[in-house]
Structures are given as C-alpha cells and as structure tokens.
Image (cartoon, rainbow, N blue to C red):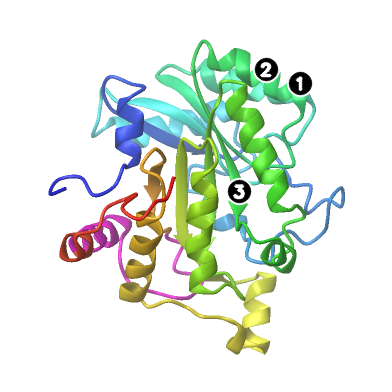
Amino acid sequence: MDTKRYRDFADFLNEHFDGKVQKISLHAGFTCPNRDGSIGVGGCTYCNNQTFSPDYCHTGKSITRQLDEGVAFFARKYPTMRYLAYFQAYTNTYGELEALKRKYEEALAHPGVVGLIIGTRPDCMPADLLDYLADLSRRTFVLVEYGVESTSDETLRRINRGHDFATSVDAIRRTSAAGVLVGAHMILGLPGESRELMLEHARRLSQLPLDTLKLHQLQLIRHTRMAREYESRPQDFHLYGVDEYIDLAIDFAERLTPRIAIERFVSQSPAELLIAPNWGLKNHEFTARLLRRMRERDAWQGRLCDE
C-alpha cells in the first residue's frame, strides 16, 4: 500500500477517458425548490451559492460563453485538455424537461466538451429526465452528483434540507439502475453529529451503488442561517482543527468501500465569505498532508469496511 492509499477521482476518470479532462463549472440560471417555496424557503442553513462560482461563472452569461472563458483559462497551459461541463450552482435538474435538455445539449455542442457532470438534489430527479439522461449516457459521459450531506434524518431536518435519507437512497439506486454514473456529496462536522455517526455514514454509503463521493469539512459561511446559529449557540458546533479533521477523514475512508472513488476530502470557500475554520491550506496541500498521515498510520481506504 505504499503508492495508493485511496481511490481518487483521477483513477475514476482514467477508466472513462484517455488523456486529461478538466471540469468547467457552470451557473446555468437554475434556482432551488428549497428556496422558491415548492419544498421550502430559505435554503439549506449552511448554503451560500457564491462559494461555488469561479470568476467566469456568473448568471447572465450563456453556457457557451462560460465554457469559452473556462476553456481559455485552462487551454493556455494545457492545449490538449478536454473538458467536462459541470452544472454546479443550485439544483441543475430543477426545471421543465425541454429547457433542461437545451442547456445540456448546448454544453455538449461546445468543442472540447466530452461529457456532463450535473449537481442536484435527490428529490429532483423525475422519471422522464432520468430516462433522457440514461439515453444521453449511452453516447457520452454523464455523472449525476446528489447532495446527500448526511444519512441522519434528524440532521437533515436541522439543516433544512427538505428531504430525508431514504430519498437519497432511492435517487441513487434509480440513477445507477438506469446506467447513469452517480456520485454523492457529504459534509463532515454538521451540528449535532457525533464522530460515531459520521463514521456510520461511511458504512451506509458503502451499501449504495455510488461511483464517486465528495467529502468536505463543515465551513461557516457569511450570510447563512447557520452562521447566525453559530453566533447564538456556538456550543452546538465543533469546528475541526486541520489535524483532527485529517484523522476523522482517514477513519471515514477506512470504513468506505474501495469501490467508491473519493473525489475530495475538503473544499475551499472564498476568504471573504469564510468565517471558520480557516486552515490556510490549499486543497492539494491538505491532500499531501492527509496522505502523509495515512502512511504514518498505515491506513487505506476500505481497511475497516465490512462490505
């Protein structure tokens, strides 16, 4: 286990592409059913979508223009790079089917784009859209990423997700059964969750037909309901130090099936929006530190998985 301690996103992409591919984030003008009143209002308590968007990714620009600017950013250094159009901000399957198809097809028509990654909620995957994505996946790369965030219904209610874990299980199983690649997003450190519960998340996710997983530490972001909660009840929160979180992430990975590729362990929010924790590390610096700790512990993904 000296060279590869966990299955990363590059391993996953190498199974689907020859050569390098790069995600380009898109803001396609979607909203969220947890904001517009159809499911809830106010959104998830931790959410500020400004944290998702690079400089070229703003509403008001067409998908084609966003892709043009994203490709220009990367192509100077990597002229042979190919791209995945990443529908990231808000809920990217929330809309009328024909309008959704036009957005996806516009992205796929862009030179150099070789597939789609679609971020969405597990309660926003109707059967007709999944049928379309299943057909699309037979001719190009399609990965649907669901915001699961927690396997605890109590936590999901507390953070105002507007769905339960059973909804995530159903969406993941239906998507995989349709032949579409499927990922999940989880937050470690949500208020009220014990270390034991967070490690139980790994066991529960290992039982699902997931291809990829994104983890990230809880971050308190300005202008969110959770930030206000922290101001009034800081005792309800445990904000991890970097080394403490590294050990938690490793413990999680050891209980996660090695079948699932771990795309990331952390995320970075813009400094002007981040309240805490501020570790002062780039993602690649964090990963190097995590791998060093895995070697020290002789740890690897799946070591304690009971799959």
**Mark 3 packing: few (<14 Cα in 10 Å), some, or many (20+)?**
many
Look at the image and tell me in which quarter the C terminus lies: top left
Q: What residue is drawn where x is 65% and y is 88%?
A: 233
Q: Is residue 270 above or below residue 99?
A: below
Amino acid on which disc 3 is placed: Gly
The residues tagged by marks 1 and 2 sit, at their Cα atoms, a distance apart of 6 Å
Q: Position of residue 283 (x, y in %)?
A: 32, 57
Q: Which residue is mark 3?
A: 147
The magenta span reads 268-292
276 drawn magenta: yes
Q: Which mark is residue 78?
A: none
Q: What residue is drawn where x is 60% and y is 42%?
A: 146
Q: Position of residue 278 (x, y in %)?
A: 40, 74
Q: Which mark is residue 128?
A: 1
Contact flag, marks 1 and 2 (Cβ < 8 Å):
yes
- In terms of sequence position, does the residue under pointer 2 or pointer 3 come before the other? 2
Q: Residue furthest front?
A: 306
283 drawn magenta: yes
**Residue 193 versus residue 232: which sits nearer the camera?**
193
